[in-house]
Image (tube, grey):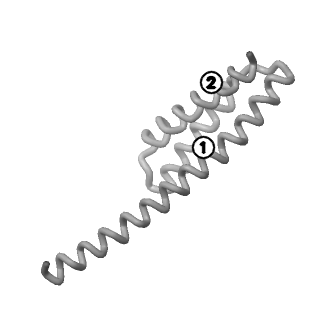
Amino acid sequence: MTDSAARAQALLKDHRESIDRLDAILVYTLAERFKQTQAVGRLKAEYNLPPADPSREASQIERLEWLSREADLDPEFAKKFLNFVIAEVIRHHEQHQK
């Protein structure tokens, strides 16, 4: 292996290790987020509030689109991701209502 190929392999390894750390951060962050939304779901069930809050969801999507532009992340990707998360949260809230 040439020196440049060895350097490339070392850089690749470093990038992959960073990606692995970031994936762990994402998973733990999502887990914490869902703990909070499950608490919201229990509260909504206790007080017979609707599982979905379209106004809050719209404002969150707008906020995430702004954050994604600030972070140089494709806003459409961020919107799709948040819509997926919101759908899962609503599903959890509906389960608490049963």
Dot 2 amino acid type? Arg
Say few, some or many: other residues with alpha carbon within 10 Å of mark 2 (under 14 / 14 to 19 / 20 or more): some
For marks 1 and 2, give the one nearer the viewer. 2
Q: Position of residue 16 (x, y in %)?
A: 37, 64
Q: Earlier in the sequence, mark 1 or mark 2?
A: 1
Q: Is residue 38 left or right of residue 3?
A: right
Quadrant (top left, top right, bottom left, bottom right) of the C terminus: top right
Please state the horizontal and vertical placement of residue 87, each as a whole percent of the image.
Answer: 57, 27
Mark 2: secondary structure:
helix
Q: Which kind of residue does numbered mark 1 sit on?
A: Arg
Give the farthest residue toward the left: 2
Q: Which mark is residue 80?
A: none
- Mark 2 highlights which residue? 91
Q: Is residue 51 above or below residue 69?
A: above
Image quarter in which the N terminus is found: bottom left
**From this viewpoint, which residue is outermost toward the right?**
47
**Residue denoted by label 1:** 63
Name the residue at 52% across, 32% down.
84
Would you place residue 97 above or below residue 41 in this image?
A: above
Marks counted in the figure total 2
Q: 11 or 59: nearer the eye?
A: 11
What residue appears at the point 57 percent right and 37 percent down from the top-left corner?
Answer: 61
* Relative to 32, 6 lies left or right: left
The crowding category of the residue bearing disc 1, from other C-alpha atoms within 10 Å (few below 14, some 14 to 19, many at least 20), is: few
Quarter of the image holding residue 96? top right
Q: Residue at x 17, y 80 (%)?
A: 4
Residue drawn at x 31%, y 73% is 11
